[in-house]
Image (cartoon, rainbow, N blue to C red):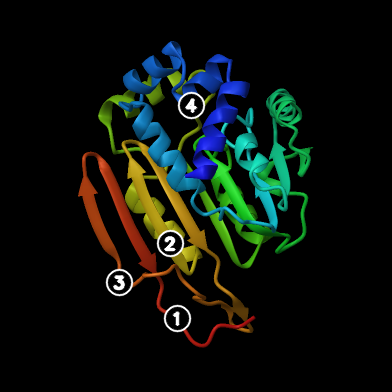
């Protein structure tokens, strides 16, 4: 609760643009877009964002990669609460990064470095990060397969991959507006995941997966398996994980998945 209040307070200091208002559902134009395009109110926006960020512990002190950082409206306030973390923020757009850096400077965040780059060819060694965070990026990436491979590659065994992005098939109105408005403006790039395809993909890559959605936004928290001579195996899952369980309520879906181990986990 303390971190949540700190983040919300920082939002008020940094969010002023149309994009930021839309991401935080904190301005009249932003609330209109959230309602008309995404069929969400502010509480629902906060819900999927909190779920996506839940993979980053409040006492996180490791190495974290955020890609793409965008304007930093959702994460600079978070990093303000993680002074012991070593954060690298990457984006293809120098304009977006400039806005994120301005927010970091305004909040006095000193543990973040910024780097321009392509998620499809990340300039980092294998296993460089303890956590990889990707908020609202995958639906825009032109080469999604490369993005999945690269974010997996730079994450250390046992590390966490978490975030959120648009999935098709959950809301017809949203899907229609994406095709007719967002794609022509190059904000979004097909093809897109569905909840079923995303579940299959993440379960095939990671040893433990928490996955859900709020309307057309999927959120996920994944644990990368540890490695032995035969490849990546199922490592330590999330507390309470067992067989896949699925529940639906009010346009929301949540599930917890854990792959069966093929043998003893390596290091």
Q: Which badge, 4 or 1, comes first in the chain's sequence?
A: 4
Q: Which badge, 3 or 4, comes first in the chain's sequence?
A: 4
Spatial CA span between label 4 and label 1: 39 Å
- Element carrying mark 3: loop
Q: Which mark is residue 199?
A: none
Spatial CA span between label 3 and label 4: 34 Å
- The residue at the far front in this view is 2
Residue 166 in sight in this render: no
Q: In the rendered structure, are the residues bearing label 3 and label 1 in contact, judged by CB atoms less than 8 Å apart?
A: no
Q: Which badge, 2 or 3, comes first in the chain's sequence?
A: 2
Task: Check disc 2 and report the residue beneath it.
Answer: 209
Can you tell which of label 3 and label 1 is closer to the viewer? 3
Name the spot of residue 191 as percent of width and height, x first.
45, 39
Q: Residue at x 60, y 41 (%)?
A: 78
| Residue 129 in the figure: left or right of residue 9 | right
Task: Check disc 4 and report the residue beneath it.
Answer: 24
Q: Which mark is residue 261?
A: 1
């Amino acid at each position: 609760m303390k971190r949540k209040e700190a983040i919300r307070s920082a939002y008020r200091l940094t969010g002023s643009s149309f994009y930021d208002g839309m991401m935080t559902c904190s301005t009249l134009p932003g609330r209109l877009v959230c309602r008309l395009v995404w069929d969400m109110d502010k509480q629902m926006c906060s819900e999927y964002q909190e779920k996506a960020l839940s993979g980053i512990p409040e006492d996180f002190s490791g190495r974290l990669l955020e890609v793409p950082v965008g304007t930093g409206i959702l994460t600079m306030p978070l990093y303000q609460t993680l002074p012991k973390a070593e954060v690298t923020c990457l984006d293809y757009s120098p304009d977006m990064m400039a806005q994120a850096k301005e927010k970091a400077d305004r909040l006095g965040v000193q543990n973040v470095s910024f780097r321009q780059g392509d998620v499809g060819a990340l300039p980092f060694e294998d296993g460089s990060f303890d956590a990889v965070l990707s908020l609202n990026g995958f639906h825009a990436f032109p080469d999604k397969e490369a993005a999945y491979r690269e974010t997996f590659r730079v994450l250390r065994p046992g590390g966490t991959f978490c975030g959120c992005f648009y999935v098709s098939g959950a809301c017809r109105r949203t899907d229609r507006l994406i095709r007719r408005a967002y794609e022509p403006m190059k904000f979004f790039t097909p093809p897109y995941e569905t909840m079923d395809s995303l579940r299959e993909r993440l379960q095939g890559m990671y040893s433990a997966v928490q996955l859900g959605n709020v309307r057309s936004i999927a959120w996920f928290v994944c644990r990368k398996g540890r490695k032995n001579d035969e490849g990546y195996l199922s490592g330590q899952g999330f507390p309470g994980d067992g067989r896949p369980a699925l529940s639906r309520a009010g346009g929301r879906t949540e599930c917890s998945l854990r792959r069966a181990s093929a043998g003893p986990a390596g290091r």
